[in-house]
Image: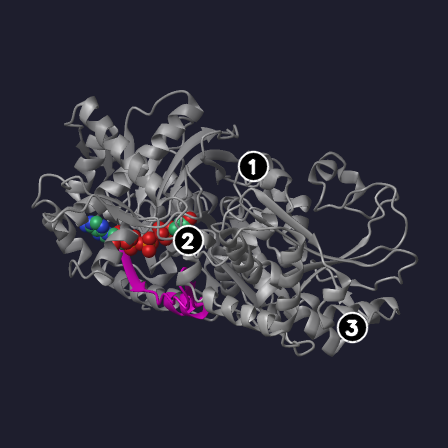
Amino acid sequence: MDKGTTMPVRDGTKRPLVGVIDDGTKTVRFVIYEAERSEELVSYQMDKTEVQPQEGWSEQDPLEIMHHIKLCAENAIDQLVELGYTKDDIVTLGITNQRETTIAWDKYTGEPLHAAIAWNDIRTDSTVDAILAKIPDRNKNYFKNICGLPISPYFSALKMRWLKDNVKAIRRASRDKRLLFGTVDTWIVWNLTGGPQGGMHITDVSNASRTLLMNLETLNWDPILCRLFGIHRDTLPQIRSSSEIYGTVKDGSILDGIRISGILGNQQAALVGQNCMQAGQAKNTYRSGCFLLYNTGTRRVKSTHGLITTVAYKLGPDVPAVYALEGSIAVAGGAMKFLRDNLRLMKDVAADTEHIAAQVFSTGDVYFVPAFSGLYAPYWRKDARGIICGLTAFTTKNHIIRAALEAVCFQTRDILEAMNKDCGMPLSKLHVDGRMTSNDLLMQLQADLIGIPVLRAQAWDMSTLGVALVAGGAAGVWGAEAARATHSDTFLPTTTDDDRDARYTKWKMAVQRSLGWATNKKSFNMTGQAKRKTSMVTQQSLDVPSSPGSRKASLFDNLLDVKLDKNYDDEEYNSYVEELLQYSARKFSIFVPSKPRKKEHTILDDVDYFMSKKECDYGMCECCAPEKKIQTNWESIEEIIENDPEIIFDSDDNPIVVEPVRNDEPVFFTSISTGAANLSKKINLDKLPGVFKSIYNKISNSQLT
Ligand SMILES: Nc1ncnc2c1ncn2[C@@H]1O[C@H](COP(=O)(O)OP(=O)(O)O)[C@@H](O)[C@H]1O
Ligand SMILES: O=P(O)(O)OC[C@H](O)CO
């Protein structure tokens, strides 16, 4: 870029510039702000490729993210010249990002080891079940005191666990100490600051608080949670504040040499951009999802009504963190895209939605619950699925599109109800932003359905402004008192309380109907599992000997044994078989008793004990000499036998050399839970799959036959 340009800057005053990288779920943007001014100067945006390899899965390409960032930056910087600036006027960079999306890569080659697993991907359903099985009462809120979050497929720890369980390359990298994990901010900073050549492996508190691994009090990785999910701390980034000079870009790109001084998750960034910096202020951002954050100051409010506690921001290494209560809605604008792409009810979301929905005065009593990947706050039901109900012969696409808009508003009301209960003081107005807020009809419906004024921000994008502020603050070019965003429009409620409440009651009825849809029982005949079961029954009835060591034969052996153990009626048995196939048959624990134990607990079986007795260092002390516990799955057993029969790896991928058994019998068991029934089952040795016998024999010098 030509430094000696003679073009005048826009009001004759040349200000330092702050560049912002915004990696959203669907788009990457690069935005440039002049310090102290709240309107963006220039921006450039590119769409990302979303891959859905299976139903409920959503992946992104980590390399594409980096590629798009560079191209967006080049294009935005090109536009600077026309405004009288050059690249050298960019004094610092901020990064704001989709949160929870998880990437694993090789620290020496920089290669991603798998596609990024997006925040709204629900492949970890059974991982959640496996983790819940280790927690008292299978209570998904058990660790909320520590990390503020329920155990849900939404959060990064589940995705990391899934990657370790299912991707050989990741297990190997972990074993060889080459594995790095990160949310997208971490991936971006590591690459920008040198990648394999000394890239910084860091994240900020707002992103770390979305992993389910960070302790909200210490603002560090929590050892208990890391242990529970089997994530080694060395693979996690260092947690830093949201506003400090972290380092300098060293990637040879157009951004080379610019400092990086701000990182914020995109919803927290919007809170800052909306200037909701005082306790009691809240904003709602409407994008693919919708996220309502309520600033609670330096106080961590624990929600008892289904909201989550998150870090809002920490404006420097030495200042306290500010927290927020958050109501997360998985699908908002995403429902419009679904109506456009899947049902083809419109051509262009931005141009058509409002116009089509405004052609009818109501939804005609149609309700649309867009629970495509379950419901997040305040329900946290991964078994919910989308429904459109109340259809009649008069229903048109206008009603359905309007119902999709109302669904965003009702979900916001769900969150507000919970928030008002948790905070004790109802919100008197709602600040909104996000691309969807350009839809006036949506804004009016929102005011009507929550009964308080809705204040639309002056620009739809408050996230990039927010991180520009914190990055500019750390770089000393954007003071705390500088111009901040204001709202440009206010939408006042026009409905009565009675009308509002009647419609909300109907919405709750619709939500009820969406719950439990994704249970195994209901989907049994639809998923292809029925076929697998039939083939096993055939095997059973013909008494065909199973081929030793084969995967199918092993499953069959287990199922037989379980069936003998309990009398299930057909339906229950069917669902049990299905669940066993999906989860339990892949996840076994092998306990090899070694020394007599003083206490009956392990970290995963007695969390309370470990919570109160951290000094026991998770089983390494005298009082807790644990039995050797090896958690593994079919693939890793086979791999271990193949590669190194003498050594086995625990869930942290630390090698364990298993001691020979003395007197006790080895115990092989599998445990699952189907609704009320807890089906923990010691596997009959006669039915033990061949592969377990051989591994047991190898590790114990015994001869099970
Ligand atoms: N005028 C509109 N009315 C309704 N929905 C809209 C409108 N404009 C955009 N949207 C929806 O808002 C979302 C825009 O999200 P965007 O800010 O691009 O994304 P992301 O969440 O990927 O970062 C899209 O899902 C789109 O369907
Ligand atoms: O990219 P968005 O706007 O859909 O934001 C996604 C959220 O950060 C997920 O928590």
Q: Is residue 182 left or right of residue 448?
A: right
Viewer-nearest of discs 3 and 1: 3
Q: Is mark 1 within 8 Å of ligand 2?
A: no
Residue at 74% x, 37% y: name it: 609
What are the residue bounds of the magenta stretch? Answer: 41-68
Please tell me how crowded label 3 is: few (under 14), some (14-19), or many (20+) other residues with Cα within 10 Å.
some
Give the quarter of the image for residue 147: top right
Circle 1: residue type: Lys
> What residue would you read off at disc 3?
694
Question: Residue 106 has which mark?
Answer: none
Q: Is residue 286 above or below residue 523?
A: above
Tally the marks: 3
Farthest top residue in view: 424
Indicate whether residue 381 is drawn in magenta: no
> What residue would you read off at disc 2?
522
- The residues tagged by marks 2 and 1 sit, at their Cα atoms, a distance apart of 31 Å
> What residue would you read off at disc 1?
144
Question: Earlier along the polypeptide chain: callout 2 or callout 3?
Answer: 2
- The residues tagged by marks 2 and 3 sit, at their Cα atoms, a distance apart of 38 Å
Please tell me how crowded label 2 is: few (under 14), some (14-19), or many (20+) other residues with Cα within 10 Å.
few
Q: Is residue 534 above or below residue 218?
A: below
Describe the colour scheme in one phrase.
Answer: one colour
Circle 2: residue type: Lys
Farthest right residue in view: 662
Quadrant holding the N terminus: bottom left
Query: Residue 225, image x and y in percent?
Result: 64, 46
Q: Is mark 2 within 8 Å of ligand 2?
A: no
Question: Earlier along the polypeptide chain: callout 3 or callout 1?
Answer: 1
Residue 526 in sight from this viewpoint: yes
- The residues tagged by marks 3 and 1 sit, at their Cα atoms, a distance apart of 41 Å
